[in-house]
Image (cartoon, helix red, strand yellow):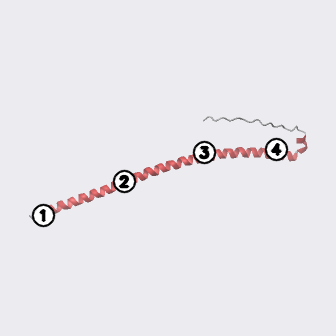
Amino acid sequence: ESLRGAHQSLERQLQELEERHSAEAAGLQDTIGQLEDDLRNTKNEMARHLREYQDLLNVKMALDIEIAAYRKLLEGEETLFNMGSVGLPTLNSLPSPTYSFQPRSFTSST
């Protein structure tokens, strides 16, 4: 009788342990699922940031090219201006250029 009582007590303890471990395992599975969702969201956010960075880098490169072109134009104008102040009499003997305006029509291809 005493062994039966001990056996039943051990069976109850085993059942309680199994239930506790099952609940703990379910909680850990939920945590894993949340962490996987967080990881997926973080990866998507990183990909979005990378695309934005690439777009900004492309804009920066285009602006750098445009700045370099304007710098060349300014340096050319400065050279012409410096030549004009040094050799003003020689420039007066050159024929003055004539400019004509010809408007262009632009069509959209989209």
Name the element at disc 2: helix
Who comes first in sequence, dot 2 or dot 3? Answer: 2
Instruction: Determine the secondary structure under disc 3.
Output: helix
Q: What residue type is labelled 2?
A: Ile
How far across and down, in percent of the image, does residue 27 sit? 32, 57
Residue 82 position, x and y percent, is 83, 47
- Residue in the foreground of this view, choosing between 45 and 69: 45
Tell me the residue that label 3 is attached to: 58
Q: Tell me which numbered mark, 2 or 4, is placed earlier along the sequence.
A: 2
Distance (Cα) linking label 2 and label 4: 71 Å
Amino acid carrying label 4: it is Leu
- Return the residue found at the far bottom: 2
Corner quadrant of residue 62: top right
Q: In this view, does 52 lie to the left or right of 67?
A: left
In the rendered structure, find residue 5 and report the number of the disc placed on it. Answer: 1
Mark sitting earlier along the chain (1/3):
1
